[in-house]
Image (cartoon, helix red, strand yellow):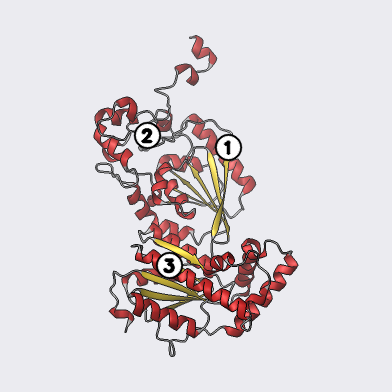
């Protein structure tokens, strides 16, 4: 009831609860990525990182013993510092702070709950992570051993033994959340979303988080992304439209199929947009295909099918406005990058729980999708370089993704345009077009002809 009196517009502190290797950090970072994408400025404050600031080198599991007074003092201090920074983040006007710690005792949770509600007037939600699935638990343990800074200097045998004893220390102290005893708002997530239960969860923001957690599953292993092959419009510098592949784009489609047959699993599935050039690019791949409307390219409205030179000539003011804020600029009768992000939400939620998917998409759409998984700042998205005839492979490594880019041996135009320095409405045509990439209409004609045509 006390939590219900806090305004819906107050910032929210999320506190993770649970034993190590239960997926807390993975959940924290996935949730932060989701909230940031939806306009809620969110940051994760990892208690372990604060602990490492007070320890030049991790020693052993002994620091986690309940009777280790010095170790307990370091851990309490680290938790206080993480919470202090999280509160400062919220005071600065941000929406959500996620405190990634264990918070395994009722005393710790009651103290944090009272401080947040009574002293700060902020909302607070506890998320308890429970894992009884032995296969998933083993996977989480392997990820800790591989990616935790605590075990970089240990042999595998030493690390396994140390982590096992660390878990034993925590299990002796762990008091699971009990809604009949504790007056707190909490969500319990079992086996990374297999079962989700809520207790005294109020508020629109919290309800949205509950919905996300209810649809969450374990992270995908591998995802592939590629733009369609070079299109006829790419070759002549025109944007949008529904043109077919150029001859080089058709070659890329064949080479892409050969490449994927060599590197991808047999159960590969392909998602394309509804536009012709993505379907043609995927045509030779022997895998189930699905055309998804949300993957269609950004709608350029009245500028569909134009070159940048034509846009500057006919709509110089619109062209300048777009350069000033490419993320939020919406073409007249068309879309902005923000609009793409909105329609991609269900696709991204689905991809988070998929494995071995190839997305054949478009430049603006893939910028947004890759930016999401790589947790890039939103203003960086419109200028990401996602070249043609390149396969981008994302592999889940803990809660982060490893990126591998493979350029396939088929020539193509470069469609990447950097932001010009001069974005003024009164700029000259030369200043407006200084970063426009070359295309058929602007390159010397002999580059597009064979020797016999050049002689003719």
N-terminal label among 3 and 1: 3
Q: Are marks 2 and 1 in contact (CB under 8 Å)?
A: no
Q: Nearer the viewer, mark 3 or mark 1?
A: 3
**CA separation in Å, label 2 and label 1:** 29 Å
* Closer to the camera in the image, 93 or 426: 93
Whether residue 179 is visible: yes
**CA separation in Å, label 3 and label 2:** 37 Å
Q: Which residue is mark 3?
A: 86
At label 1, counting other C-alpha atoms closer than 10 Å, the crowd grade (few under 14, some 14-19, many 20 or more) is some
Q: Which residue is mark 2?
A: 420
Question: Where in the figure is residue 313, as x and y percent of width and height?
Answer: 27, 27
Question: Where in the figure is residue 61, as x and y percent of width and height?
Answer: 67, 74
Q: Nearer the viewer, mark 2 or mark 1?
A: 2
Residue at screen point 47% across, 67% down? 216
Give the secondary structure at mark 3.
helix
The dot on residue 408 is: 1
Question: Where in the figure is residue 232, as x and y percent of width and height?
Answer: 42, 31
223 lies left or right of 180: right
Residue 222 to residue 281: above or below = below
Quadrant of the image containing the N terminus: bottom left
**CA separation in Å, label 3 and label 1:** 45 Å
At label 3, counting other C-alpha atoms closer than 10 Å, the crowd grade (few under 14, some 14-19, many 20 or more) is many
Residue at screen point 44% across, 70% down? 84
């Amino acid at each position: 009831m006390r939590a219900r009196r806090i305004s819906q517009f107050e910032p929210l502190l999320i506190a993770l609860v649970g034993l190590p290797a239960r997926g807390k950090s993975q959940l924290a970072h996935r949730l932060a990525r989701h909230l940031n994408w939806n306009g809620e400025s969110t940051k994760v404050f990892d208690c372990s990182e604060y602990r490492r600031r007070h320890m030049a080198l991790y020693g052993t599991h002994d620091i986690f013993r309940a009777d280790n007074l010095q170790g307990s003092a370091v851990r309490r201090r680290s938790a206080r510092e993480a919470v202090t920074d999280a509160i400062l983040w919220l005071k600065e006007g941000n929406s959500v702070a996620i405190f990634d710690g264990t918070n395994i005792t009722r005393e710790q949770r009651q103290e944090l709950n009272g401080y947040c509600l009574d002293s700060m007037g902020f909302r607070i939600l506890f998320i308890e992570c429970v894992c009884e699935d032995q296969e998933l638990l083993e996977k989480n343990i392997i990820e800790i051993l591989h990616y935790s800074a605590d075990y970089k200097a240990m042999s595998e045998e030493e690390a396994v033994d140390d982590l096992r004893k660390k878990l034993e220390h925590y299990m002796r102290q762990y008091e699971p959340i009990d809604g009949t005893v504790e007056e707190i708002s909490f969500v319990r997530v079992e086996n990374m979303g297999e079962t989700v239960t809520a207790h005294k969860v109020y508020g629109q923001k919290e309800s949205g988080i509950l919905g996300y957690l209810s649809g969450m599953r374990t992270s995908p292993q591998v995802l592939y992304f590629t733009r369609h092959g070079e299109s006829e419009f790419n070759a002549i510098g025109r944007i949008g439209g529904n043109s077919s592949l150029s001859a080089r784009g058709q070659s890329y489609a064949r080479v892409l199929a050969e490449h994927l047959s060599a590197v991808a699993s047999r159960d590969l599935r392909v998602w394309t947009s509804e536009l012709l050039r993505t379907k043609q690019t995927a045509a030779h791949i022997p895998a189930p295909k699905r055309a998804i409307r949300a993957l269609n390219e950004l709608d350029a409205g009245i500028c569909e099918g134009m070159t940048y030179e034509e846009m500057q000539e006919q709509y110089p003011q619109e062209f300048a406005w777009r350069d000033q804020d490419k993320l939020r600029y919406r073409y007249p009768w068309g879309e902005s990058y923000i609009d793409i992000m909105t329609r991609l939400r269900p696709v991204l939620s689905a991809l988070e729980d998929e494995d071995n998917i190839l997305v054949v998409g478009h430049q603006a759409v893939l910028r947004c999708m890759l930016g999401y998984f790589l947790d890039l700042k939103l203003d960086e998205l419109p200028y990401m370089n996602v070249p043609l005839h390149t396969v981008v492979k994302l592999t889940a490594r803990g809660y982060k993704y490893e990126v591998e880019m493979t350029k396939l041996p088929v020539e193509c135009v470069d469609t990447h345009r950097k932001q010009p320095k001069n974005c003024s409405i009164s700029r000259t045509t030369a200043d407006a077009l200084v970063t426009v990439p070359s295309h058929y209409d602007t390159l010397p004609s002999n580059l597009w002809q064979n020797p016999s045509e050049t002689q003719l």
